[in-house]
C-alpha cells in the first residue's frame, strides 16, 4: 500500500510555478530601457547603422545625408561615361536626383540594358519586314535592289538611317521612295519625258528643267 503521507503535493497554481508557460513575462523580450535607450527603440527604428535619417523638409540636412552616403559634388563624380551628349544628359539627370554612386551606376546599367534590348527587338522586326517586302519582288529583285542602292546613295543614308525612316513610314514605303529616286536619277524620261546622263543629280535636273 502506497505511503500517501510521504508524497509531495502537486502545485496546480500557475502563478506560483515560474516554470509554467502561463507565467512567462512577455516584457522580458523587449529591448530594455537604459539611459542610452530611454524609448526602448529597436534596431529597426529611425536611428540605425550609425546613420540618422534627416527631416525630409530640411534641404540642407538631406543634402548632407546624401553626401555622407556617397553623393558626388557633380555628375563627373559618378565615373560614368560622358563622351556623348546622351551620356552627359544621363549623368546630369542622375545627379539631379541626388543618387549616390552605387545607385547611379545601377540605374545607368539597367537603362543601358533596356535600350539595347529594345534596339535588338526593333532590328529583328525590321529585318523580318524587309525580308517580307523584298521577298515579294520575285524576278525583279536584282533590279529593285539596284534602284534602292542608287536612291540611298543619292540621299546619303546608310542602313541605320534607312531603318529609322522605315520606322516612321514603313519598310515598303521607304524602299519604294528609294526605288523611285534611284529610277529618277538613272532615267528621267519616266518623270519628265526628257533624258539625262547618270552623272547629273536630281537637284541639277530639277534646276535645269526650271530654267526652261
Image (spheres, rainbow, N blue to C red):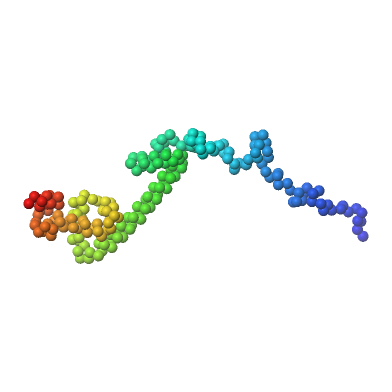
The image position of residue 186, as x and y in percent, is 13, 56
User: Residue 115, image x and y in percent?
Assistant: 37, 50
Which residue is at a point 28% across and 52% down the rendered structure image? 164
The spot of residue 19 in percent (x, y) is 77, 49
152 in relation to 73, above or below: below
Q: Residue at x 14, y 50 (%)?
A: 203
- Residue sitting at x 42%, y 48%: 110
In this rendering, does residue 130 appear at all? yes
Is residue 140 or residue 94 the one in the foreground? 94
Split into 4 quadrants, where in the image is the N terminus?
A: bottom right
Which residue is located at x 70 percent, y 44 percent?
Answer: 27
Whether residue 146 can be seen here: no
The foreground one among 168 and 1 is: 168
The quarter holding residue 39 reads top right
**Among all residues in the image, which is located at the extreme left?**
212
Residue 35 x %, y %: 67, 34
Which image quarter: residue 42?
top right
**Residue situated in front as seen by the camera: 148 or 42:** 42
Q: Is residue 194 left or right of residue 172?
A: left
How many marks do you count on the picture? 0
Toward which corner of the image does residue 84 lie, by quadrant?
Answer: top left
Amino acid at each position: 500500500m502506497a505511503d500517501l503521507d510521504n508524497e509531495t503535493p502537486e502545485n496546480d497554481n500557475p502563478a506560483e510555478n515560474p516554470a509554467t508557460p502561463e507565467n512567462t513575462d512577455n516584457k522580458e523580450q523587449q529591448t530594455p530601457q537604459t539611459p542610452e535607450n530611454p524609448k526602448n527603440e529597436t534596431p529597426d527604428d529611425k536611428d540605425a547603422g550609425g546613420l540618422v535619417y534627416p527631416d525630409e523638409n530640411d534641404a540642407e540636412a538631406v543634402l548632407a545625408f546624401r553626401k555622407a552616403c556617397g553623393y558626388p559634388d557633380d555628375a563627373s563624380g559618378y565615373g560614368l561615361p560622358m563622351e556623348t551628349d546622351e551620356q552627359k544628359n544621363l549623368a546630369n539627370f542622375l545627379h539631379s536626383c541626388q543618387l549616390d554612386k552605387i545607385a547611379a551606376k545601377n540605374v545607368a546599367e539597367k537603362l543601358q540594358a533596356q535600350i539595347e534590348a529594345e534596339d535588338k527587338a526593333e532590328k529583328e522586326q525590321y529585318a523580318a519586314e524587309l525580308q517580307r517586302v523584298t521577298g515579294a519582288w520575285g524576278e525583279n529583285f536584282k533590279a529593285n535592289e539596284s534602284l534602292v542602292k542608287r536612291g540611298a546613295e543619292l540621299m546619303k543614308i546608310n542602313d541605320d538611317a534607312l531603318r529609322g525612316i522605315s520606322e516612321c513610314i514603313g519598310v515598303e514605303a521607304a524602299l519604294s521612295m528609294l526605288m523611285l529616286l534611284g529610277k529618277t536619277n538613272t532615267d528621267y524620261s519616266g518623270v519628265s519625258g526628257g533624258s539625262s546622263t547618270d552623272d547629273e543629280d536630281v537637284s541639277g535636273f530639277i534646276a535645269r528643267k526650271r530654267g526652261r
